[in-house]
Amino acid sequence: MKIRDVKAMALTTGSIFVRVETDVDGLVGWGECSPMNADVLEHFVNTALRPRLIGEDPREIDRLWHAMFFGTYKLGVMGVQPEAIAGVDIALWDILGKSTGLPVAVLLGGVFHESIPMYRSIGGGSGMTPAEMSRTVVAEGLKKGFKAAKIRMDWTAARRDIDIAKDLEMARVVRDTVGEDFVLGFDSNNGYAVASAIKFGRELEALGYAFFEEPIAQYDYAGMARVVAALDIPISAGEHEYTRWQFRDLIEQARVDILQPDVVKCAGITEMKRIATLGSTHNKDFMPHQTQPTLGTAANLHVLASLPHLNLAQEYTGNRPELDEVFVEPLEFRDGRLTVPREPGLGLEVDERKLARLLR
Ligand code: CA
């Protein structure tokens, strides 16, 4: 079997899908890249990765991963390069699954979890009032069946301690809305100074929040280690790390409790599985970052399903009907859980005629 073509395609939804075509009749794999800069990512996949893949056997995934990673690492190992590789790598796993008739989770070692509890996560936090956050994220989430949610502040490392009083009010109002038993996480998107994060984290502990995500700037591992040491609430981070080496540093230096790699950012399923193994070596919990609700979430689910230890609800932004339409059978969300697809590959069959309508 050989790869005949590789093509990244930006959609009008903001998503970036990758299609890998083989020389076996009709056998095509699908992946997804992080939707950060469609022009740059499309170009990277189609010009830097494609020539390294044409004519290769798509089932030799690790070898091709190395060819892509070490063939293009000088173009940047944070951001575009691993995000582009992610789309291809996920498509290669899809091909391997379809060619063997097995779901990706089985190829990764087996299905430890047939369905996975998800927490509701949407952006826009810094622009919302506490009442709006409570209504749009939590109350609507409850109606959809979620039993867990994360509220997000959308601050950044460059805008520190903007409105901590409002953030705390939001955390309180949301807790009041859902009651004690509902699982809540708080994500400050790198927005606090170390001392503020420690003070704020104590409030979250009193309010019974389950985790505190990216409390401070993502590049300040020493500061993060101070926050981790000072607080009992588990600290999560990892959406700004792209490889196992960066996760090694996040674990050893920042000492966070929960690892959050993102399969559409961290060079795909192949590297994410390595990061999961590294995390288990250090007894860390695993709760990947994931904001892409179709191919990205499916790839994430297969990795999660293949991990023996999994005790946290996982990130899900909820389905988007305009994207679901492109798939013969979209992912199934019921009673707060997503079912791990059991069809071969990722288990999401793309209707290419419908997809054509969404091409940018
Ligand atoms: Ca986040």
Image (cartoon, grey):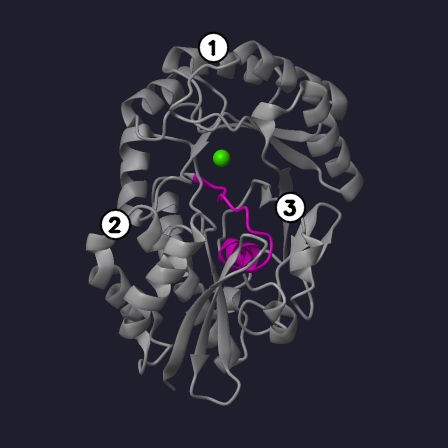
Rendered image quadrant of residue 112: bottom right
Residue at 53% in and 85% down: 26
Q: From this viewpoint, is residue 144 visible?
A: yes
Q: Quadrant of the N terminus?
A: bottom left
Query: Range of the magenta residues?
Result: 285-306
Q: Indicate the position of residue 114 as horizontal and vertical percent values.
A: 63, 58
| Residue under numbered circle 3 | 117
Structural distance between the alpha carbons of marks 2 and 3: 35 Å
The residue at which mark 2 appears reads as 76
Query: Which residue in the rendered view is the most extreme toward the bottom?
Result: 25
Which badge, 2 or 3, comes first in the chain's sequence?
A: 2
- Dot 2, crowdedness within 10 Å: few (<14), some or many (≥20)? few
Which numbered disc, 2 or 1, marks the residue that appears first in the sequence?
Answer: 2
**Residue 299 x/y as whole percent:** 51, 59
Q: Secondary structure beneath disc 1?
A: helix
Label 1 or label 3, whichever comes before in sequence order: 3
Mark 3 is surrounded, within 10 Å at the Cα level, by few (under 14), some (14 to 19) or many (20 or more) other residues, namely many
Q: Secondary structure at mark 2?
A: loop
Q: Quadrant of the C terminus?
A: bottom right
Q: Nearer the viewer, mark 2 or mark 1?
A: 2
Image spot of residue 27 (x, y percent): 50, 82
Type of amino acid under label 1:
Lys
Q: Residue furthest front?
A: 360
Q: Specify the amino acid type for callout 2.
A: Gly
Q: Is residue 348 visible?
A: no
Residue at 50% in and 90% down: 25
Above or below: residue 189 compared with residue 35: above
Residue at mark 1? 199
**In this rendering, which labeled residue sits more in front, label 1 or label 3?**
1
